[in-house]
Image: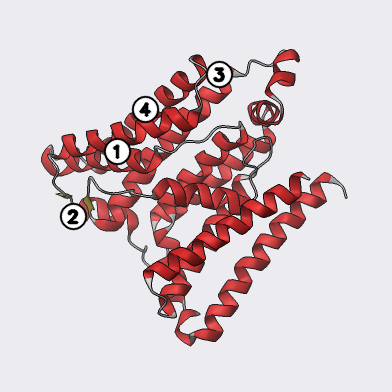
Amino acid sequence: MPFAWKKAGEALVLLAVWAGLIALFSLLRGSFFTSTTFGSVANRIPALAVVAAGMTLVMITGGIDLSVGSLLGLCGAVVGVLMADQHWSLVPAMLASIAVGGLIGWVNGAVSVQLRLPSFIVTLGMLEIARGLAFEVTGSETKYIGASVETLGAPMAGLAVSPAFLIALIVIAAGQVLLSQTPFGRRLIAVGANREAAHLSGVRTEPPRIIVHALLGALAGLGAVFNCSRLGSADPNAGVGFELSAIAAVVVGGTSLMGGRGSVVKTFLGVLIIATLEAGLVHVGVSEPLKRIVTGMVIVLAVLADGWRRR
């Protein structure tokens, strides 16, 4: 099968799974298939979508970042302090959040690449550092921001979706173009597929890996603003377990855990699948423990499918 047709077939499979979930939950609970439900799902996923897009690029290079949940909490804390305490407007606070996230992401990448340490270990340490900083920045208090940030996450007039959702779509499109249509994207795939072969071919393998970590950090900063806009506040506890959701979406979307293969668009389909699954389970009255079990089983199945594809 030609490569392009194979990729299209994988995307169609993901679309079929998503459509199947919608059909299943609509049959189980008629109130699920409404514009209100879909609008709610769409407006809950912008933060996850942009972070998962960045995580896709990192995982394609063979790395991983476990700190994005804590980083989302820290960047949200920065937004909360700047807007609630210092009375900054939304755009400067957003830029500050992105800058803080990008800087910490760059540190993750530089330390793991330059010192040749597993990104798993480096970002696990940063997970604790960033969470501690989030509590220090806020004084362990929730910062209530209010309407000045909520407009970003609220549905627009005449539409069921928010500005945050539309920005997330732009990020997804830009990420896919970067990955599939630019020399930098092809370099990421080469590095993830076989780092030694890429090095012997004259490809500098260190800078791309550092750059994607910094990019993921910046997108975590953007996701933090989206999260604050949905809640109207900045909580230093925000983002606990968020890294697992992002990794799950990437894996469900077909990105290889071993690197060298992935798609930002298919990651977005993975986000939709997980968000729809969670919303559907809530609609049918599944308890929280059982919901976690079902979601975990879906992730395990996606990992098994990845192993089958590699063989």
Q: Tell me, what colour scheme is on the image?
A: secondary structure
Q: Is residue 5 visible?
A: yes
Q: Secondary structure at mark 4?
A: helix
Cα separation, mark 4 vs mark 1, equals 10 Å
Cα separation, mark 2 vs mark 4, equals 27 Å
* Residue where numbered disc 2 is placed: 146
Cα separation, mark 1 vs mark 3, equals 24 Å
Cα separation, mark 3 vs mark 2, equals 40 Å
Q: Residues within 10 Å of mark 1 (few under 14, many from 20)?
A: many
Could you say which disc has been placed on residue 75 in the image?
Answer: 1
Between disc 1 and disc 2, the foreground one is 1
Q: Secondary structure at mark 3?
A: helix
When the figure is inspected, residue 74 is found, relative to residue 245, above or below; the finding is above
Q: Secondary structure at mark 1?
A: helix
Which residue ends up furthest to the right in the rendered image?
Answer: 1
* Residue where numbered disc 4 is placed: 104
Q: Residues within 10 Å of mark 2 (few under 14, many from 20)?
A: some
Q: Amino acid at mark 4?
A: Ile
Q: Secondary structure at mark 2?
A: loop
Q: Amino acid at mark 3?
A: Pro
Q: Seen in the image, is 165 located left or right of residue 257?
A: left
Between disc 2 and disc 4, the foreground one is 4
Q: Residues within 10 Å of mark 3 (few under 14, many from 20)?
A: few
Task: Classify the position of the C terminus by image quarter.
Answer: top right
Q: What percent of the width, then of the height, locates residue 94?
A: 31, 39
Mark 2 or mark 4: which comes first in sequence?
4
Between disc 3 and disc 2, the foreground one is 3
* Residue where numbered disc 3 is placed: 207
Residue drawn at x 70%, y 27% as measured from the top left = 190
Mark 4 or mark 1: which comes first in sequence?
1
